[in-house]
């Protein structure tokens, strides 16, 4: 069952029950008030009627100059007296003990009407309501009355069927009006439930669009709970969109990475297999064997370099172990390791550092600086110089800079140099066993330390790369 249908049916059921209950309670309460009002007025009327009858008897005694009237005379007085109330549907019955003296009421009185009537106090009356066989309803009022020196039971009977007829008419009217009102209310509730749930249906359709890759925001048309839900849905949609775009970017990067990795490994593996096959199957002189073995050795080192740096990139996804290190000592260690390599390529190397402490992963920062210096040495011509400096900037930020006097990097290539496997000079990279992973690894290490890599280069004049521990963690090109 649809949600709008549930709202419609539940609301209609609750409203129908509530309206019917209220209507029946109101009709019942109104009937009870009318009945109580009729009883009160009838009791008051009864007192007047009894008093008037006693006055008539007394008057007749004085008129006839008799000490006491007999039952025949009393009956005649009662008959004449009853004519006064014919139009009011008021009947009178006068009993002397169990003997009926007079009655203009043609029906039998209730059997229990006179039970314990003698025990009533003076001025009190017994009130009884009974429905007759033909559904007429009568109000009986009786009490003991002293007429002359005798005790009588004076009873008035009033037809109050009209009070019950009014109630029944109201019930019949409501039984006709109720279904009509229910139909009208049902139609209104149907429209309201459809309107109230239309925005929910719009949200449902939007979820299907999101599932199909459409991430458009929904217009918020109200400030109620559904409006808040729409706003939350838009927030969720935007978050999903960003996550999907991020995953797509990661998937695209991984595809490029794997494609490049496959390509990079294919060439050395082909060389290794080819040279190995020649060594295995052909008779070669010692010099040729040495040359082939040297080629296999170089290609193997190249594969080792690729796999090692690839593993470093993967491991960098884990949180680095931060410790406080002595910066001058780190620079000194790098100087001792790099100077022989630079000298073998006839490139001068110098390193300098201020006194400073730095919280970082020592081995990762050392690897980063090694990579930067290694690239600088490879890009330098014999007789030029590469420098490493550690210092504080004017704004108090710890910074390392690696500068060379090499060939420089074209401006259009600067934005790509941090991409894995990207190489500006592929021939030189192949010569020195470069895989194009060095700067990508450096960028990952910098990000892990919330540091920034800045590169400034000019073709023919050289390159300067700065590592800034500024807490921003991004790469930039100057």
Image: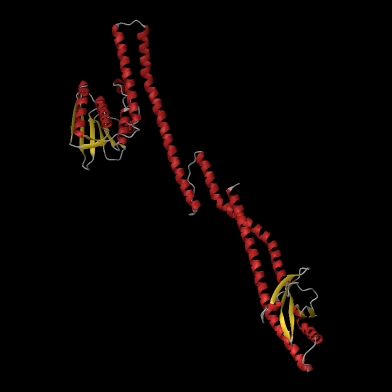
Q: Residue 98 location, x and y as percent?
A: 78, 78
Answer yes or no: is residue 283 visible.
Answer: yes
Quarter of the picture holding the C terminus? top left
Q: Residue 198 location, x and y as percent?
A: 56, 50
Residue 306 lies in what quarter of the image?
Answer: top left
Q: How many marks?
A: 0
Residue 422 or residue 218, whichever sits in front: 218
Say left or right for 336 vs 41: left
Whether 392 is drawn above or below 8: the answer is: above
Whether 110 is drawn above or below 466: the answer is: below
Say left or right for 38 vs 262: right
Residue at image location 23% in from the left, 31% down from the top: 403
Residue 456 lies in what quarter of the image?
Answer: top left
Answer yes or no: is residue 436 visible.
Answer: no
Whether 194 is drawn above or below 289: the answer is: below
Q: Residue furthest right?
A: 72
Residue 65 or residue 251, whichever sits in front: 65
Q: Residue 261 location, x and y as percent?
A: 38, 24
Residue at image location 21% in from the left, 34% down from the top: 327
Residue 79 lies in what quarter of the image?
Answer: bottom right
Residue 246 or residue 476, whichever sits in front: 246
Residue at image location 54% in from the left, 48% down from the top: 200
Whether 218 is drawn above or below 448: the answer is: below
Say left or right for 347 vs 111: left
């Amino acid at each position: 069952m649809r949600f709008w249908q549930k709202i419609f049916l539940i609301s209609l059921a609750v409203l129908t029950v509530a309206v019917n209950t209220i209507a029946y309670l109101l009709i019942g309460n109104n009937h009870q008030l009318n009945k109580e009002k009729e009883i009160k007025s009838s009791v008051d009327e009864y007192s007047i009627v009894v008093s008037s009858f006693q006055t008539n008897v007394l008057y007749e005694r004085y008129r006839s100059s008799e000490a006491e009237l007999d039952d025949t005379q009393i009956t005649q007085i009662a008959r004449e007296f009853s004519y006064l109330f014919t139009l009011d549907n008021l009947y009178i019955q006068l009993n002397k003990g169990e003997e009926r003296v007079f009655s203009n009421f043609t029906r039998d009185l209730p059997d229990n009407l006179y039970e314990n009537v003698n025990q009533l106090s003076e001025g009190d009356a017994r009130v009884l309501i009974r429905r007759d066989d033909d559904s007429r309803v009568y109000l009986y009022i009786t009490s003991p009355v002293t007429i002359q020196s005798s005790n009588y039971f004076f009873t008035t009977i009033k037809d109050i069927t009209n009070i019950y007829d009014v109630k029944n008419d109201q019930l019949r009217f409501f039984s006709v009006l109720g279904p009509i009102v229910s139909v009208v209310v049902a139609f209104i509730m149907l429209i309201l439930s459809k309107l109230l749930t239309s925005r929910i249906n719009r949200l449902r359709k939007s979820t299907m669009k999101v599932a199909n890759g459409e991430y458009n925001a929904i217009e918020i048309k109200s400030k109620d709970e559904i409006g808040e839900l729409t706003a939350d849905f838009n927030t969720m949609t935007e978050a999903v969109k960003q996550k999907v775009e991020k995953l797509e970017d990661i998937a695209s990067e991984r595809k490029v990475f794997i494609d490049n990795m496959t390509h990079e490994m294919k060439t050395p593996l082909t060389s290794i297999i080819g040279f190995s096959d020649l060594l295995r199957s052909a008779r070669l002189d010692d010099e040729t064997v040495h040359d082939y073995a040297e080629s296999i050795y170089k290609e193997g080192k190249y594969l080792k370099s690729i796999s090692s740096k690839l593993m470093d990139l993967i491991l960098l996804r884990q949180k680095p172990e931060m410790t406080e290190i002595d910066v001058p000592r780190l620079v000194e260690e790098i100087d001792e390791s790099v100077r022989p390599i630079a000298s073998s390529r006839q490139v001068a190397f110098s390193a300098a550092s201020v006194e400073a402490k730095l919280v970082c992963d020592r081995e990762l920062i050392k690897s980063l600086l090694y990579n930067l210096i290694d690239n600088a040495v490879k890009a330098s011509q014999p007789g030029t110089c590469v420098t490493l400096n550690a210092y504080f900037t004017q704004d108090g930020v710890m910074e390392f800079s690696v500068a060379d006097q090499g060939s420089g990097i074209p401006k259009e290539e600067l934005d790509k140099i941090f991409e894995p496997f990207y190489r500006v000079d592929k021939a030189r990279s192949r010569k020195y066993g470069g895989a194009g992973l060095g700067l990508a690894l450096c960028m990952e290490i910098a990000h892990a330390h919330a540091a920034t890599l800045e590169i400034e280069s000019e073709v023919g004049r050289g390159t300067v790369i700065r590592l800034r521990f500024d807490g921003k963690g991004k790469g930039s090109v100057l």
